[in-house]
Amino acid sequence: MAMVEGRANTRISEYLLDSPIESRFSEEKYILFLQGITAVFDGFKALDIEALGIEHNELRVIIGPNGAGKTTMCDIISGKTRPTTGSVYFEGQNITETAETEIALLGIGRKFQTPTVFDSLTTYQNMELALPGHQNWFANLYSKISPEENNQILSILERVGLKNELHTEAKYLSHGQRQWLAISTLVLSNPKLLLVDEPAAGLTDAETALTAELLLELKGEHTLIIIEHDMDFVRQLDSPVTMLHEGKIMAEGTLADLQQNEEVIEAYLGR
Ligand code: ADP
Ligand code: MG
């Protein structure tokens, strides 16, 4: 994210609104751009985002109190929920009406709040199933894993410290290990944009620190949007933060900027 010199507390959305509409998402500056997005459920406006741009290979943290609309925003980006108004652009393409499965194929991957791993499958089998083109694993027990794919699986598992748990069924892994396995399967599917919802929830301090390291390693190869509540974790990520409050962007900047913002303290951090 480009921090505007001398305007540390300027909301990016306001800054963006200074530039002509076409240049906001067509210049290949942003991998993802949300424009005029609202999500209304039974008359209740859960999300109301004027403009939000995520640059290629940036790591953006989204914070905000419960009910702020963070998960709804991920649902809209991934195509799980349709916005009531507005448009979502991914790599310059309008994906507002694109089917969820198609959006995944375009390169948007998602890790849900609770880790989605198959309990009765081993670590390795969970990875096998995540390989692009291997989703029919159950139907085709003999589907071949190439030596390259095998190496790729082992190198990712090594990075997250799961190489000694290859043949352990996922149900016997610790909560932290399950989170890393879920992130690993996501990485294996090699999405351009990863949406990661509350990865530190329920983790010990040591597990939280390792998760932050892992996600930071992914930055540069992938664009990441990370939703998080745990301020220690957000501090470790040391990345631009957008705060949502009652569905709107209340502030954007570094965590330090936000910690000095009266409005943010009042609404969230001070509690
Ligand atoms: P967060 O993830 O920031 O805690 P959510 O995006 O889950 O917030 O929820 C934002 C608001 O939208 C909440 O008030 C929630 O109850 C409401 N909401 C989310 N999804 C739906 C839905 N499918 N139907 C009705 N209300 C919803
Ligand atoms: Mg949520």
Image: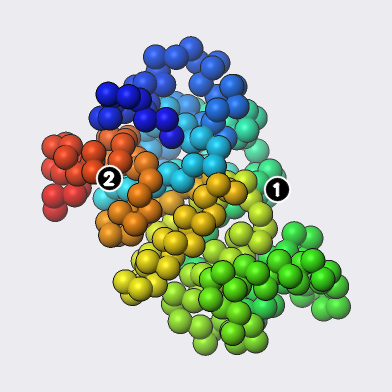
Query: Measuring 43% from the left and 44% from the top, which residue is drawn there?
Result: 60
- Element under disc 2: helix
> In the image shown, does 85 or 172 lie closer to the viewer?
172
> In the image shown, does 226 or 233 lie closer to the viewer?
233
- Element under disc 1: helix
Q: Position of residue 35 (x, y in %)?
A: 47, 27
Above/below status of 19 relative to 98: above
Query: Measuring 50% from the left and 15% from the top, which residue is drawn there?
Result: 21
- Cβ–Cβ under 8 Å for marks 1 and 2: no
Q: What mark, if any, has residue 131 been given in the picture?
A: none
CA distance for labels 1 and 2: 33 Å
The image quadrant that residue 36 belongs to is: top left
Q: Would residue 10 be found to the left or right of residue 27 on screen?
A: left
Q: Which residue is mark 2?
A: 255
Question: For mark 1, does the 10 Å Cα neighbourhood hold few (<14), some (14 to 19), or many (20 or more) residues?
Answer: few
Q: Would residue 19 be found to the left or right of residue 236 on screen?
A: right
Query: Measuring 35% from the left and 25% from the top, which residue is drawn there?
Result: 4
Q: Tell me if residue 39 can be seen.
A: yes
Q: Position of residue 127 (x, y in %)?
A: 67, 71
Query: Measuring 71% from the left and 66% from the top, which residue is drawn there?
Result: 152
Above/below status of 252 relative to 216: above
Q: Position of residue 251 (x, y in %)?
A: 28, 35
Q: Position of residue 200 (x, y in %)?
A: 38, 64
Q: Which residue is mark 1?
A: 105
| Mark 1 or 2: the one toward you | 2
Q: Dividing the image into 4 quarters, which one contains the N terminus?
A: top left
Q: Would residue 131 be found to the left or right of residue 174 on screen?
A: right
> In the image shown, does 65 or 27 lie closer to the viewer?
27
User: Which amino acid, mark 2?
Assistant: Leu
